[in-house]
Each structure stands twice: as structure tokens, then as C-alpha cells.
Image (spheres, rainbow, N blue to C red):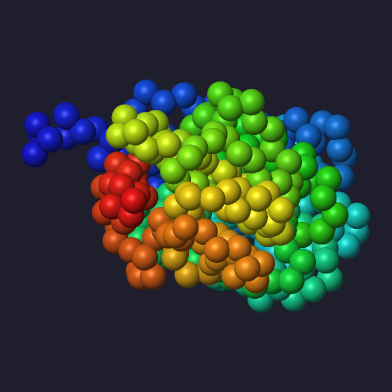
Amino acid sequence: MSTTTEKKPRLTTSAMIASIAGEGQRVKAAPFGKALVELAQERKDIVGLTADLAKYTDLHLFAQAQPERFFQMGMAEQLLMAAAGGMAKEGFVPFATTYAVFGTRRAYDFVHQVIAEENLNVKMCCALPGLTTGYGPSHQATEDLALMRGIPGLTIVDPCDALDTEQAVPQIAAHQGPVYMRLLRGNVPLVLDEYDYKFELGKAKVLRGGRDVLVISSGFMTMRSLEVADQLKADNVDVAVLHVPTIKPLDEQTILAEVARPGRLVVVAENHSVVGGLGEAVAGLLLRSGTVPKAFRQVALPDAFLDAGALPTLHERYGISASAMSQQIKSWL
């Protein structure tokens, strides 16, 4: 047992604080918290609220910089969303943080009725989306996109990395209306700076071209897709990657233009249940538009309650590691 631990130290990392960064990968610490602190220096209407999770959503940096604009609501996510809605009515731009399971499952009616129905200017930034914790179904928000996509008028953002996250913060603040952003916190991987990338709310971006496979991805699965593209290059498989950081509204024009290019297998990769996320959003778009790709497949989490454990093990088990995704794509070609 001790020998195994020495060889694979990542597997013993706490399930709650584990990073999605690979060993030796470049990271930036707390990109959300730092970006919000910088934005709040320019905009006096920015306030921050959390449900007893400032440290675990990087909002503690905002609390230290702007204590008079920080509100600790305690373990009461319904109150968190209701208070954020009330502050938005008074002209503030509230950034409300908690874990995604609590912000969606527990506070859903308050998001729906208090915030979204009145189109209030609340920015909900929720950590531990999908399979980014090993704490099991109580903390794994594997269905958050399905829930939130069903709310009219709600903008949904799923950043890939630190660059995506820090650039998204001022743009979602400038957007008029409610926003749900999946939050990467702590030491967040940095990959998109190598692709001359800039986040634009509502826009999908082609990160690399490829003749054989088109991977349409969001969140950290874009990072995985880029890794897969490098791996499959050795097998003479040319993989294009289209990053879709805004889940709702979809950049339909860009997606349809890329899918319309002939002869490519289309794969949607997401850190979410196979039900109700980006995959079904893209599939619905293709059906409605009459666009038929060579073949359409999904890399996603199963429609199931997932196990607890170490993230590298779980990502491999559920098919969202780079190695598992590479093997799956090769089997489809």
C-alpha cells in the first residue's frame, strides 16, 4: 500500500480539494477571485455573497479586498439566492457563490422564481461542477446544466481553464440578466493561452482544425479534447476542437458551420450527464436545422449516481480522462 501511494500521490489527494490539473501542468491560482477583486475596484456596484463557502469558491479574496461589500449568508442557499435577487433589485450586481449541487438542486425554485422570472442581474458562480470532486452524488453536480438549461432567459457559461474564467468575469458582469457559471476554483489549469484565445460571451471558438474528427466541447473537457487531439495525431487521426464556453445561448452559427464540413465524425465532450447537457443541446440543434454529420457520438458522464473516490480514478472509470476518450474515439472511427 505504501509503495502504491508513493508512485501515485495524486490518488490520495482529498476528494474535496483535488485539482483537475495534471501533474506538472501549468496552473493559475484563484482566477475567479482575483478577477472579481480587480473588477470590483472599477465597479462599485459589485457585491459578493456566499453560503459559508468563501474559501472554497475563491470569494475569500473578494471578502478581504471589499469587506463592506461581502455578505456571508451561512448554510442557506435559498436565502443566498433570494438575497442576491433583492440586491439586484436595488441596483447592485451580486456575484453569488456556492457549490453547484446547492446552487441548482437545493435553491432551484429561488433561482427560477426570484431571479430568472424577473430577469434580475444576478451572477451565480458555482464550484464543483460535474465530476470535479470525489465526494459522491451529494457533491457531484452531474445534472446542473440540465436543470439550468430549462430556465428561460438564463445565460450559462462553462469555462475551460483559468484564462477562460478570468476573462468571463467582467463579461458576465456587463451582461444584463441572470448568469449561471460553472466555477473552477483553486489551482486552475492554464491551457488556452497557447491558442490565441479570447473569451467572448455567446461565442464558440475553433481551437484547432482537423479532417477526421470534430470534437465539440465545454468546460475542462476542452482541455481533455486538446490532449486527445495530440495523442491521436500519433495514430494519424486528425482531430479538430471547437470550444463552446457558452452553453446557453448556443453559438448556433459556428456549430452548424463546423458540423457541415463533410466527412468528419462529430463528438460532443462534456463534464456532465449524458442527459440534458451540451450533447443534447447540439443534437437538438442539428435535428432542427437538418444538418446530418457523418456520425454523432457523445463523451459524457453516465445517467447514474457516480462513485466516490479519487478524481483520476473516477475520470478513467467514467470515460472522461484523455486516455479513455482517445480509446473511445478510435473505436468509433
User: Which residue is depicted at the point 77% across and 39% down?
Assistant: 170
Q: Is residue 45 left or right of residue 79?
A: right
| Place of residue 321 in the rendered image (x, y in percent of width and height, measured from the top left) | 34, 45
Q: Is residue 166 left or right of residue 282?
A: right
Q: Is residue 134 visible?
A: yes
| Place of residue 242 in the rendered image (x, y in percent of width and height, measured from the top left) | 57, 44
| Place of residue 58 in the rendered image (x, y in percent of width and height, measured from the top left) | 59, 40
Residue occupying the far front of the picture: 262
Splitting the image into 4 quarters, where does residue 22 fall? Answer: top left
Q: Is residue 19 visible?
A: no
Q: Is residue 305 left or right of residue 259?
A: left
Q: Nearer the viewer, residue 76 or 14?
A: 14
Q: Is residue 233 left or right of residue 89?
A: left
Q: Quadrant of the N terminus?
A: top left
Q: Nearer the viewer, residue 186 or 75?
A: 186
User: Which residue is depicted at the point 58% across and 53% down?
Assistant: 259
Image: 34 above or below 112: above
| Place of residue 149 in the rendered image (x, y in percent of width and height, measured from the top left) | 63, 67
User: Which residue is depicted at the point 58% across and 48% down?
Assistant: 261
User: Which residue is depicted at the point 54% across and 56% down?
Assistant: 99
Report the number of numbered marks: 0
Image: 108 above or below 163: below
